C-alpha cells in the first residue's frame, strides 16, 4: 500500500503537470508487467472504463424517460445537431433498449437490472443493404455494371464493410449484425446465445459488456480491444443527454 499512497500523493502534487501523469502511470504498469504480456495494461483499461459506468447508466436512464415522454421510437427518432445524430428506444417490459445513430457509428444499448444482477451491453450494428434506397448517397460511387472486377471490389471494400451488414446471401458467420438481428433476440434476453452469447469481444458488434451478480465483479472486460469505439459511444450517450436536459429546462 505504501507505493500506492506514494503514487497518489505524487499525482495529487500541485507541481506535477498533467502531461506527466500518463507517463508516471505508464512506467508503473511497465514495471509490474514483467512478462511483456500487457496484462496490467489490459486490467487498467477495464478498470478505467468501469469508472465511467455509473454516470453512463444514469444518463441512459435519464434519456429513456425523455424518449418515452416524447415517443421517440424507430418511427419517430429524436436527436440533435444537423440531422445526422439520432436516438430512439425500443419498447421492452423488463429492460432499457436504446439505439444511437451517427454518421460513423450506430449502436444499441441494452440495460437490465433487478435485485440480483446488473447487465449493460453496447453493440454496434450496421445497415441492412436490402433495405437501403437505390439513391442512397453511399451507393452513388459504386460500380453500376453487373460485371464488377476484383479491383473495383477492393477499392470500395473498406467503405462497404464500414457501412453495411454482412448478413447477406447464405452467410452463416455474420460479423456485422443488423439492428433487426438484435431486436429479434430481445425476447430471449438475457439467455440468448447470439449475438450476446459470450458477452465479450468474441460477440459480433461487440463494444462493451458489464455483468455483475450481487455487485460482485462489477467490471467490464475486453475493453482494450474496443477502447476507441467505447469512447465514441460514451460521447454520443453523453451528448444526447446534455441536449435533452437543455430542452427540458428550456
Image: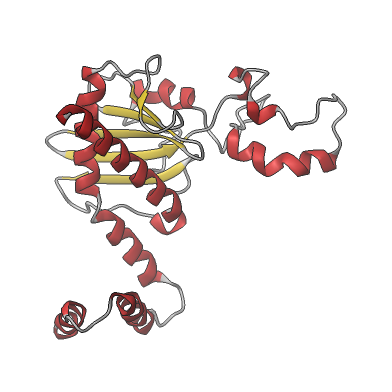
Question: Is residue 192 something that shows in the picture?
Answer: no
| 35 left or right of 187 in image | right
Q: Is residue 15 left or right of residue 29?
A: left
Instruction: Name which residue lies at 38% across and 65% down.
Output: 42
The image quadrant where one finds the C terminus is: top left
Percent coordinates x, y for residue 197 in the rendering: 41, 38
Kindly indicate the quadrant of the structure image that contains residue 63: top left
Outermost residue on the front side: it is: 250
User: In this picture, is 132 found above or below 200?
Assistant: above
Residue at 44% across / 28% down in the picture? 83
Quarter of the image for the N terminus: give it: bottom left
Task: Give the image location of residue 179, x and y in percent.
Answer: 47, 26
- Residue 136 percent coordinates (x, y): 63, 23
Q: Name the residue rendered at 73%, 40% in the picture.
A: 156
Residue at horizontal 42 percent and vertical 55 percent from the top: 227
Q: Quadrant of residue 111?
A: top left
Q: Position of residue 124 (x, y in %)?
A: 46, 38
Amino acid at each position: 500500500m505504501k507505493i500506492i499512497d506514494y503514487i497518489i500523493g505524487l499525482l495529487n502534487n500541485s507541481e506535477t503537470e498533467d502531461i506527466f501523469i500518463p507517463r508516471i502511470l505508464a512506467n508503473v504498469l511497465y514495471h509490474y508487467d514483467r512478462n511483456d504480456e500487457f496484462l496490467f495494461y489490459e486490467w487498467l483499461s477495464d478498470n478505467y472504463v468501469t469508472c465511467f459506468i455509473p454516470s453512463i447508466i444514469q444518463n441512459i436512464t435519464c434519456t429513456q424517460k425523455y424518449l418515452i415522454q416524447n415517443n421517440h421510437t424507430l418511427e419517430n427518432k429524436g436527436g440533435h445537431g444537423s440531422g445526422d445524430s439520432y436516438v430512439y428506444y425500443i419498447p421492452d417490459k423488463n429492460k432499457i433498449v436504446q439505439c444511437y445513430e451517427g454518421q460513423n457509428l450506430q449502436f444499441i444499448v441494452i440495460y437490465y437490472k433487478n435485485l440480483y444482477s446488473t447487465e449493460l451491453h453496447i453493440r454496434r450494428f450496421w445497415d441492412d443493404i436490402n433495405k437501403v434506397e437505390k439513391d442512397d448517397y453511399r451507393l452513388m460511387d459504386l460500380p453500376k455494371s453487373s460485371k464488377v472486377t476484383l479491383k473495383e471490389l477492393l477499392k470500395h471494400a473498406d467503405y462497404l464493410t464500414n457501412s453495411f451488414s454482412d448478413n447477406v446471401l447464405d452467410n452463416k458467420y455474420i460479423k456485422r449484425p443488423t439492428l433487426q438481428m438484435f431486436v429479434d433476440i430481445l425476447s430471449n434476453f438475457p439467455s440468448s446465445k447470439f449475438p450476446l452469447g459470450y458477452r465479450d469481444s468474441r460477440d459480433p458488434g461487440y463494444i462493451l459488456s458489464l455483468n455483475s451478480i450481487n455487485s460482485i465483479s462489477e467490471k467490464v472486460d475486453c475493453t482494450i480491444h474496443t477502447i476507441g469505439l467505447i469512447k465514441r459511444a460514451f460521447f454520443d450517450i453523453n451528448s444526447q443527454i446534455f441536449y435533452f436536459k437543455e430542452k427540458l429546462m428550456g
